[in-house]
Amino acid sequence: MFTDPDDGFYWSDGGYNVSVSISVGYGPISVSVSRGGIGSIGYFKRAGIANKAVKLYIYRDLTTTRYKRYKVYYSGAQQYIGYVYKTVPTKDYLTIRTAPF
Protein backbone atom coordinates (compact mmCIF):
# COMPACT_ATOMS: atom_id res chain seq x y z
CA MET A 1 0.00 0.00 0.00
CA PHE A 2 1.46 3.35 -1.05
CA THR A 3 0.78 6.60 0.76
CA ASP A 4 1.75 8.78 -2.19
CA PRO A 5 0.44 8.31 -5.78
CA ASP A 6 3.95 9.06 -7.09
CA ASP A 7 5.38 5.99 -5.33
CA GLY A 8 5.57 2.78 -7.29
CA PHE A 9 7.44 -0.34 -8.28
CA TYR A 10 10.90 -0.65 -9.77
CA TRP A 11 11.35 -3.88 -11.75
CA SER A 12 14.54 -5.18 -13.27
CA ASP A 13 15.05 -8.48 -15.06
CA GLY A 14 18.25 -10.03 -13.81
CA GLY A 15 17.97 -13.31 -15.71
CA TYR A 16 17.25 -16.02 -13.18
CA ASN A 17 17.33 -13.47 -10.35
CA VAL A 18 14.37 -11.12 -10.83
CA SER A 19 14.47 -8.05 -8.61
CA VAL A 20 11.53 -6.12 -7.26
CA SER A 21 11.96 -2.96 -5.19
CA ILE A 22 9.22 -1.13 -3.35
CA SER A 23 9.80 2.45 -2.23
CA VAL A 24 7.42 4.22 0.10
CA GLY A 25 7.91 7.83 1.09
CA TYR A 26 6.04 9.75 3.74
CA GLY A 27 7.17 13.33 4.33
CA PRO A 28 10.86 13.36 5.22
CA ILE A 29 10.87 9.59 5.94
CA SER A 30 11.53 7.05 3.20
CA VAL A 31 11.50 3.26 3.46
CA SER A 32 12.84 0.98 0.74
CA VAL A 33 12.56 -2.81 0.47
CA SER A 34 14.71 -4.63 -2.06
CA ARG A 35 15.09 -8.30 -2.97
CA GLY A 36 17.97 -9.51 -5.14
CA GLY A 37 20.33 -7.45 -7.24
CA ILE A 38 19.31 -4.56 -9.45
CA GLY A 39 20.43 -4.85 -13.06
CA SER A 40 21.63 -2.09 -15.34
CA ILE A 41 18.23 -1.67 -17.07
CA GLY A 42 14.99 -1.44 -15.15
CA TYR A 43 11.49 -0.06 -15.29
CA PHE A 44 9.64 2.15 -12.84
CA LYS A 45 5.85 1.93 -12.79
CA ARG A 46 4.09 4.64 -10.80
CA ALA A 47 1.22 3.35 -8.64
CA GLY A 48 -0.96 6.38 -9.38
CA ILE A 49 -3.19 5.64 -6.39
CA ALA A 50 -2.74 6.07 -2.65
CA ASN A 51 -3.99 4.13 0.38
CA LYS A 52 -5.18 1.08 -1.59
CA ALA A 53 -3.57 -2.31 -1.95
CA VAL A 54 -1.93 -2.67 -5.36
CA LYS A 55 -0.10 -5.47 -7.14
CA LEU A 56 2.42 -5.30 -10.00
CA TYR A 57 1.76 -7.60 -12.98
CA ILE A 58 4.50 -8.27 -15.51
CA TYR A 59 3.72 -9.53 -19.01
CA ARG A 60 6.39 -10.38 -21.55
CA ASP A 61 6.40 -10.82 -25.32
CA LEU A 62 8.67 -13.61 -26.49
CA THR A 63 10.05 -14.22 -29.97
CA THR A 64 10.89 -17.79 -30.96
CA THR A 65 13.14 -18.46 -33.95
CA ARG A 66 13.52 -21.88 -35.56
CA TYR A 67 16.91 -22.93 -36.93
CA LYS A 68 17.91 -26.02 -38.88
CA ARG A 69 20.75 -27.91 -37.22
CA TYR A 70 23.41 -29.70 -39.23
CA LYS A 71 26.38 -31.83 -38.29
CA VAL A 72 29.42 -30.85 -40.33
CA TYR A 73 32.15 -33.41 -40.93
CA TYR A 74 35.83 -32.67 -41.61
CA SER A 75 35.28 -33.71 -45.21
CA GLY A 76 32.78 -30.85 -45.60
CA ALA A 77 29.74 -33.12 -45.79
CA GLN A 78 26.68 -32.04 -43.82
CA GLN A 79 24.05 -34.18 -42.15
CA TYR A 80 20.67 -32.71 -41.19
CA ILE A 81 20.00 -33.29 -37.46
CA GLY A 82 16.71 -31.46 -36.84
CA TYR A 83 15.31 -28.14 -35.70
CA VAL A 84 16.55 -26.02 -32.80
CA TYR A 85 14.37 -23.33 -31.23
CA LYS A 86 15.68 -20.21 -29.52
CA THR A 87 13.36 -17.97 -27.48
CA VAL A 88 14.30 -14.43 -26.46
CA PRO A 89 12.26 -11.77 -24.62
CA THR A 90 11.37 -8.81 -26.84
CA LYS A 91 9.13 -6.52 -24.78
CA ASP A 92 7.91 -6.21 -21.18
CA TYR A 93 4.57 -4.77 -20.06
CA LEU A 94 4.03 -3.60 -16.49
CA THR A 95 0.54 -3.00 -15.15
CA ILE A 96 -0.74 -2.21 -11.70
CA ARG A 97 -4.05 -3.55 -10.39
CA THR A 98 -5.92 -2.60 -7.26
CA ALA A 99 -7.59 -5.07 -4.87
CA PRO A 100 -9.41 -7.41 -5.29
CA PHE A 101 -6.78 -9.17 -7.38
Image: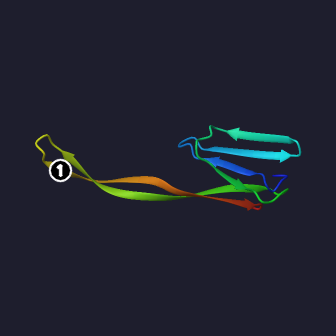
Name which residue type carries label 1: Gln
Is disc 1 placed on a helix, strand or loop?
strand
**Looking at the picture, how far across and down is residue 76, in whole percent?**
13, 45
In the rendered view, tell whether residue 43 sits above or below residue 17: below
Q: Residue at x 70, y 44 (%)?
A: 21
Residue sitting at x 64%, y 38% = 36
Q: How many marks?
A: 1
Q: Is residue 21 above or below residue 100?
A: above
Circle 1 is placed at which residue position? 79
Q: What crowding class fits label 1: few (fewer than 14 Cα within 10 Å), some (14-19), or many (20 or more)? A: few
Q: Residue at x 45, y 53 (%)?
A: 88
Q: Is residue 46 left or right of residue 19?
A: right
Q: Nearer the viewer, residue 80 or 89?
A: 89
Q: Residue furthest left?
A: 75
Please indicate whether residue 90 sits to the left or right of residue 82 in the image.
right
Q: Is residue 52 left or right of residue 10?
A: right
Model colouring: rainbow
Whether residue 1 can be seen here: no
Task: Please name the residue shown 59% across and 41% down the image.
Answer: 39
Quadrant assignment for the C terminus: bottom right
Q: Can residue 25 be spotted in the picture?
A: yes
Instruction: Give how far across and how far down residue 34 sits, in percent.
Output: 70, 39
| Image x and y of residue 81, in percent | 23, 51
From this viewpoint, which residue is outermost toward the top?
Answer: 37
Residue at the extreme right of the image, as rendered: 27
Picture coordinates of residue 33, whole percent (x, y): 74, 40
Residue 83 occupies which quadrant of the picture? bottom left
8 horizontally vs 12: left or right = right
